[in-house]
Amino acid sequence: MSRYTSATDSDRARMLEAIGAASIDELFEQIPEELRLGRDLELPAGLSETEAFDHLSALAARNADADSELCFLGAGMYDHYSPAIVDAITQRSEFLTPYTPYQPEVSQGGLQAMFEFQTAISELTGLPVSNASLYEGPSSVASAAYLAIGATKGRKKLVVSRGVHPHARETLRAYAEGFCAEVVEVGLVDGITDSDELEAAVDEKTAAVFVQSPNFLGAIEDLEALAAPAKEHGALAVASVDPIPLSVLRPPGELGYDIALGEGQPLGGRLDFGGPSFGFFAAAEAHLRRMPGRIAGETRDVDGRRGFVLALQTREQHIRREKATHNICTAQALNALGGIVYLSWLGKRGFVELGELLVRRTAYARERLAAIDGVELLHEAPVVREFALRVDARIADVLDRLADQGIAAGYPLGREYPEHEDGLLVAITERRSRADIDRLADALESAMETVQRAGELQGASR
Amino acid sequence: MSDEPTSVTESVRPPATAEIPTPQQRERATTIFERSVEDRRAATLPPAGVAEAELSELIPKRFLRARPAELPEVSEPEIVRHYNRISRRNFDLDTGPYPLGSCTMKHNPRLNERVAALPGHARLHPAQDPKRAQGALELMWLLERQLEEICGLPHVSLQPSAGSHGELAGLLLTRAFHAERGEQRSKVLIPDTAHGTNPATVTMAGFEVVKLATDERGGVEMDDLRSKVDPEVACLMITNPNTLGLFDPNIAEITGLVREAGGTLYYDGANLNAIMGHSRPGDMGFDIVHVNLHKSFSQPHGGGGPGAGPIAVSERIEPFLPVPRVVRAETGNGAGPRYDFDYEKPLSIGRLRGFAGNFGVFVRSYAYIASLGGPGIKDASETAVLNARYLLAKLSEGRAGKYLPAAFDEPAMHEFVLSGGPAKKQLGVRTLDIAKRLLDYGFHPPTVYFPLLVDEALMVEPTETETRESLDALAGAIDAILEEAEADPETLRRAPYTTPVRRLDEAAASRKPTVRQPSSS
């Protein structure tokens, strides 16, 4: 059994003596007798470090990870290459083991990293102010709704495109119960938000309009046009964005958006089966004092040295309590640090090169896969790094076949888009070479033949 | 070798002057953006390997950026040096004691980092077919059972991302629970000692905060509670032991009163580290508990996250838990159980985030619990309480006893609260001054000015992973600091002297906030 304590029997005896207690149990005497457990916890015996390592390794070995198969899964989290320096820096004790910088004089490293992170997010989104991170992407959408309700003096209608990540829409709906707000969904036409339906849905009761670009189906939305109804009715326009495509796409800040937010995992983060990652959140200056989460700001010390502190803490729960702009306390500082290290590594040019590479490879993959018999494009809208296909076969069968060959071919859309029961979302990163794409195409082609043949046989035998 | 290591304070007092700046103080803080030099770069990317079409042939020009984002242009050696240098401007738990009350700054085992980084965990895509992520689902399932046993409640959802997120989950569950019974209740009872997240969450979840007073022994004022329990009460949220480190002896009566009135019972698990293996929130009558995996279960704090805030709940709350749930089915053919995600829970409050939660955090906490086992978990709490009580005993003597008395004369558990009221009155130094001077002595200060009901509060939580020697050193440093204050309070008022920057103007940063590097273009 591993222990991470140091007290020896002799320590314990001396410490108890100093306390004036006869036993450890005496220290728990304020717990009423009837509330004491009075038995051992029913947990397995503890493990030595080597046993624990082996046990965890055995569990890990039962997962098909992105190193052990060819991964075309996306849907909000992407298998980008994370450079070695991201782990090297985020694993440093000085970043890994402190907490929230409540004592700024000894937290300048973390605070400065937050300030740099905020600057980078502001550059990416084209909006002047950013916070230091939120939990993750989808819940950041719900946090924007809370801000919007406050900023519009209690308007309670939230209009959201079905192009927004389904997890974000579900999260928004769950939070909206607490906000006592109504969520109205706007459908997609040809893969992009139905702008007529959006215009009809937005009115003077609307607090915010939520769109995503590229949307969940990979399509680039006409963000500028979609912001218009919100502007017209005094609602906030909120864009959910994938940070990597912002290397080549016009940023929401230039297109009339009040808030841009999203999932930070693509910025060099681990896949980690979904988390921890971070959410980013940038806004127009007017919303700075309503922002959720920590914000680092620049200041001076008593000798005039440049320094950084947590700014605008009077927004926050530990000061403002029930009047706080949000309840968040612990966010995702370490993951956000990984994000700024990653963006520094890519740099101004590398970031654009990565975006261009993705656009070109994705165009190749899209054309190659759509040429397969029984496979067609689900929409023809322009894309950056992900696209949706329609597959004329039972998707689960096709995916199983490909999985047997070590290929995770994509994300089936059926659960969240029943109207696209035959839909498949395919994501491309710089780690999926042309040869990998060809391998996927060949395997999909033969899987389609097999599955369709099996289907015909089944049909004939009926 | 002596069995009595020399404490920090016995050797040398830190300087009480800033006349000669330290090397770090001489170095002007420079951001990664300010290190940018045109044409420098770190990343190399693979060739596209496909046709190099103009971007505007693939994406309409009106969607394309006119100018690139102004990211830094820096080489890899510079990035490494930059972040290493700024990292040294942080104080961290691996370097010294961090007795930050309510934050449970316990050691972060490196084994947990190693197993979290295994490709089967770190490189597992969240949209992987559950059939091919059986190890991950089993780990989640096992962690849920461990937390159920520790909390004494029959169901767990790992989904919430932090304590505050768990609180929101708890109140949305409460809302759904009452709605299912055709009730709409508006009030949530919260003791005035509660963490700020509690009232902030209440507002976010659409309820109204009703504050409960604290009695002279540091517990809930029972008459106040009785007068406020009514059919409008949706929930009681409470931390126990509370933020004063005191276990409320009336807890069973408290939960009983609220339950009788039809409310749900929410246990804020921030202080769970005090009672593991000794007492369980479920046995105290609670319906919903959030567990901070970054507190009691050793997930590193990361400079302010990531964490995770799983919730354990009672039978009556279970139908409303967030989806997806992890489920296990016996295959019956000797192949072992199969794990899956279940999305079909008609009464569920839905989702609170993407995918299934902060899995990487689950791996670390699971490794921690598996390493310690039942006895080790109990030992962790026992040692945490022993360390806190020992430190409190030390600080009850001498100068600390005189100027920083315990706020309540009751036996504390894993943390305790001192009042700097006498120090302010008699020495003219505030708790903030003492905290800043502690920085010069190489300690992270305790939590200060919380809980709010204590004058000049210092909230101290040493955790089980500090040694007796480091507790002695901390007590010695506080004594030495108070001695300095007796001689000249200015010494403290002007502290710190040795930190990378000295006292910072926090008000200015909020009055006219600069929250990003000015754009270079």
Image: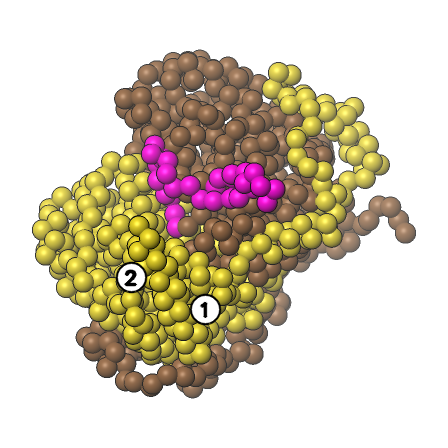
Chain colours: A yellow, B brown
* Secondary structure beneath label 2: loop
* Residue positioned 65% across, 27% down in the render: B278
Quarter of the image for residue B515 reads bottom left
- Residue at x 22% of width, y 43% of height: A183
Q: Is residue B412 above or below residue B113?
A: above
Extent of the magenta region? B326-354
| Viewer-nearest residue: B175 or B10 | B175
Tell which subunit mark 1 falls on. Answer: A
Category of crowding for the residue at label 2, using alpha-carbon neighbours closer than 10 angstroms: few (below 14), some (14–19), many (at least 20): some
Query: In screen coordinates, is B215 left or right of B262?
Result: right
Answer whether residue A457 is visible to the viewer in this image. yes
Please, what is the three-letter code of the amino acid marked with disc 2? Answer: Asp
Image point (12%, 53%), residue name: A197
Q: Which residue is mark 2?
A: A392
Image quarter of residue B279: top right
In the image, A83 versus B90, the foreground residue is A83
Q: Amino acid at mark 1?
A: His
Determine the residue positioned at 41% across, 45% down.
A328
The stretch drawn in magenta includes residue B87: no
Relative image position of residue B521 (x, y in whole percent):
30, 78
In this rendering, would B328 be left or right of A383? right
User: Mark on residue A80?
Assistant: 1
Regarding residue A236, the answer to whether it shows in the image is: no
Q: Secondary structure at mark 1?
A: loop
Give coordinates of residue A156: x percent, y percent: 19, 41
**Residue A157 spot, x, y in % from top left:** 18, 43
Residue A429 image point, x, y percent: 41, 71
Q: Is residue B413 left or right of residue B287?
A: right
Residue sitting nearer the eye, B458 or B166: B166
Marks 2 and 1: which is nearer the front?
Answer: 2
